[in-house]
Amino acid sequence: MLRITLKSVRGHFVRFLLTAFAVMVGTGFVAGTFVLSDSIRATLDGLFNQASKGVDVVVRGTETGAAGQASSGRAALSLDLEKQLAAVPGVKRVVPDLQGTALIAGKDGTAVRSGGAPGLGFFWDPQGQSFTLLDGRGPTKAGEVAVEKRTLELSGLAVGDTTQAVIGEHRQSVTIVGEVKFGAGTTFGATAVLVDAQTARTLFAPDGRVGDFQLEAADGTSEATLRAAVAKVLPADAEAITVTDFNEENQEALGTALGFITTFLLAFAGIALFVGAFIIYNTFAMIVAQRTRELALLRAVGASRPQVRRVVLGEAFVVGLVGSAVGIGFGVLVAAGAKAALRSFVGIDLSSDLPVDALTVATSLVVGTVVTMVGAYIPARRAARIAPVAAMRDDLSIPAKGLRLRGTLGLSGLAVGAGLVVTGVTRDDIAWLLVGPGALLVVLGAIVAAPVIARPVIRVVAAPFAATLGVVGRLARENALRVPRRTATTASALMIGLALISALGVVAQSTKASVADLVAQEIRSDFVLSAGGGVAVPTSVGPAVAALPGVQSVADAVGFGVRSSDGEDLGASAGTAKGLGDNFDITMRSGSLDAIDRGEIIVNGDTAAEQGWTTGSKVSLAVGALGQKEYTVGGVYAPMQILATDIVVGEDLFEAAVPAAQRFNQGVFVKAAPGADLTALRAALVAEVKQFLVVSVEDGEEFQSTAAAGVNIILGILYALLLFSVVIAVLGIINTLALSVFERTREIGLLRAVGLRRRQLSGMITIEAVTTALFGALLGTALGVGLGVALQRGLKNQGLELLAIPWSTILVVLAASAFVGVMAAVLPTVRAVRLDILKAIATE
Amino acid sequence: MTDGHVTAAPAGAVAQAVDLTKVYGTGEAAVRALDGVSVEFERGRMTAIMGPSGSGKSTLMHCMAALDTPTSGTVVIDGVTVNGLKDKALTTLRRDRLGFVFQSFNLVPTLTARENITLPLDIAGTKLDQAWFDTIIDTVNLRDRLTHRPNQLSGGQQQRVACARALVSRPAIVFADEPTGNLDSRSSAEILGFLRRSVDEFGQSIVMVTHDPVSAAYADRVLFLSDGRIVDEINEPTADSVLARMRGFEPAGRQA
Ligand SMILES: Nc1ncnc2c1ncn2[C@@H]1O[C@H](COP(=O)(O)OP(=O)(O)O)[C@@H](O)[C@H]1O
Ligand SMILES: [Mg+2]
């Protein structure tokens, strides 16, 4: 039996090759995901180990509230603590964690950035082990910097050059005195600039507070001993932790983030494999149908049903194993591509190479082989059911089972799924528990019902061809309809990918439209100043801009964490009543916005309802790094996107709660005074922020397109990932067509004999392919748009207020699908055209 | 058969082979399927080709019908020399001037009987001559089967559809390779009668391979092939005369 299996694989080599290819792409994704996440993990490990070299204990503030973008959620520590810590016996060295943002201008005068990654500032510690000097010397006084190797490369400058820099919030001219290498080899994409210790103290900790201190133990003192000794002298708002525990904690946190990336990529691997399973199913179904006589002969000479089934499953095993083995190699390529993409688009540089460990290999092989065998299982069972007498029968076609049951099942699945989705989205808050399974049911229902839907849809799609191309078009249409199951399965593969693409398209387009609408509806600002992801707008920009003539008021976009008395983490933003009121369209449901200037808080309507707070309530909160204190609710505002946080506090409270080094200002909204000359104001703003190198000035429209650009990038990544499933679908079409051509060898010979030209033959096969592809595409986009619309409805209250359908994208997708059909037909066509007429006629 | 039906069309050769040779394979394994065959098929006549299995009958048909290329020799169809024609010209020649009936699998399963019959015209984009179509349909007696697909037709009906298709484009000559090989005697008689009528009434030229002396007797002339050579011929055959001649070739066997 094994010999028969292997012979068959060799005999149908090309067919199996295509099937194996589908397996390969799917497993490649799985393997690539593992390789990439291993690489990220290795890079992070190196980073942590390097960063904590020469550190034994970390002293940090106690946790007070939620970590937010502008706050670690921990109390900040006074720099004065340094001396106290140094005096503890067993402490060899105390290093305050003086970090901030630092950017230098490159040769071209613009800030040196690496994608959206942050620009970090450190201080040069001659005894520290995080950085090693490659060239020159470390900075020793103000105006001197050392620059990290890759950052220096990006800048186009060299040691000895003088350039402009923004250290913390201060613009200054600096001389590059040295080049350093980060111990781990990569800063994970961030640029890094080192200043001397004194400069770091003044610029990175302007309020005399830092996040933590790193302690090195004297020889012979263990981490634990040192921790215990240090803990005794600490104030109430500080705690000591051994570096081992500290790293573990951080790695856990990063592990969660990593888990997200992995899950995300694995989801696409799952889609690719799911689509691949269809191709595998189809291939095996066709091969079994073609070999009915051969398999029946096996049965006739005494093979049992399980043996016949094993022959087919054995083939699947071989194909699956080969496909997934090659897939591992492909996975390394996928990971390498992702690594390159991370580097050039996001600025994240993975220093680790791409490790392929045993787990990756084993998982990929098992997943690929199992999926192939699952896909081949139904055909294998069908093969086992072939009666021995079929060996003697002339009529080789396996009678097609009725499609009625399938139609009923699929259509009811579709209906129930659609019902669930509709119920899930027509409530205040989208019910994912209904929408998720509902959407899945809709897609599965469509797959099951596809053979039934195929007949009418293909008739319509093929109508123009039949009308214009006469018999060639009619033949193509009939061929596409000949085995509706097969056409439907082939089209389903494409359908899945395109359903996802168009659902995403609708959501993305709606997001863009809603963002644009938000800018129009909620933002009244004339200008927005921002520095792009990862880099904050210096906090001094707001006040400086506010002082410009022609500016009425400004509002900073800052977010930070707040923890309620019962431990719930909430989000907060901050501003002055005038700044917020002028720039944003805030509707107060009760109380007044002015309350925030009096140290009270105002609360988002949704949060107020959840917490049961009303204007006048006294609530206990830990705001930023401050401990639990009582605040008065001064008002409740109608929920809105731009102030989507739970509460809004005044400027004074914000400054007290969040240490200067942690205030991450994403942007400054600027409202011009009535009648101000906007062109002049813009020029003044540009002049004002020029010194900060990275801050740009945008008007409302520009801000809107910047916001949309973010959506486009995410969309681009998702599309690229989904493209893989489309590629697999194309392989499926090629495979099906090639097999059909093979099956119809005699018919093609006959057509050629009665005078069908080669071009007409190519046309016939191409139209069949295009019709099949368009069927899948139409079904997919219809489902996708439907689901997209449903999602938009469901997320109406979460920022997707407007529905926008990307018709042009959908048209492009449909046109591309037709093109995909044409491309998929090339190989089968070549094969058909080359058929020797006589041999074709003689084929049994 | 009587003299009356011999020529309804102008006399002369509609198809001609000169010193036709076909060799399959090379060296030791080479098979001379045709070994210097020269033959003329007259316009408006029905010729039967007989001979033992493997004698080269199908090969001769295929070479004459521009489905296969001879190793050497010349084929002329309706004044056109086939040798050296490119695929496109060959295709056009087959489509417009030649008709075929194979032993089996003559029809495209996805097309109805009517569509199968008009296939050569549809492929060429030529307008259907409705009167001619009606004439053929009535001759083969298929009017009530036109909307059926091949799998809804009996073997005999399928072959009648195939014959109708072979005639619909008014080809110069029709080649039929054992057209009744798979049929019972009644269906065979129908098919042969129809072919005969198309010769008598429409002046069609037909070449037909057969194993059956009774079938051969429908023809105006019978050629005997053996080992790739024409070894004998009978004009105005009867079943008995053919059978008597075949006995002379024993023990070559009778089955293909
Ligand atoms: N494609 C081919 N390759 C090799 N030999 C062939 C091929 N076709 C026919 N032959 C050989 O040529 C000879 C004549 O075959 P054929 O014309 O089919 O005979 P007939 O139709 O009279 O039975 C036979 O010996 C056959 O084996
Ligand atoms: Mg033969």
Image (tube, rainbow, N blue to C red):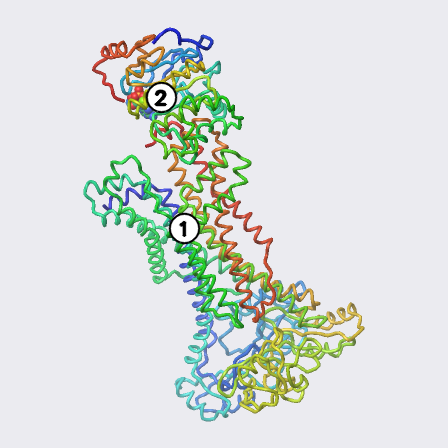
Query: In the rendered view, would you say B246 is above or below A73?
Result: above
Residue at the image position 37 percent from the left and 34 percent from the top: B152
Is residue A443 visible in this depiction of the protein? Answer: yes
Q: Alpha-carbon distance for marks 1 and 2?
A: 51 Å
Q: Amino acid at mark 2?
A: Ile
**Residue at the spot of label 1:** A22
Query: In the rendered view, would you say A809 is above or below B48?
Result: below
The answer to whether mark 1 and mark 2 are in CB contact below 8 A is: no
Q: Nearer the viewer, residue B180 or A684?
A: B180
Q: Nearer the viewer, residue A749 or B190?
A: B190
Query: Is residue A517 toward the left or the right of residue A410 in the image?
Result: right
Q: Position of residue A635 (x, y in %)?
A: 63, 85
**Is the residue marked 2 within 8 Å of ligand 2, measured from its CB?**
no
- Which one is closest to the eye, mark 1 or mark 2? 2
User: What quarter of the picture does the N terminus of chain B occupy?
Assistant: top left
Q: Which mark is residue B191?
A: 2
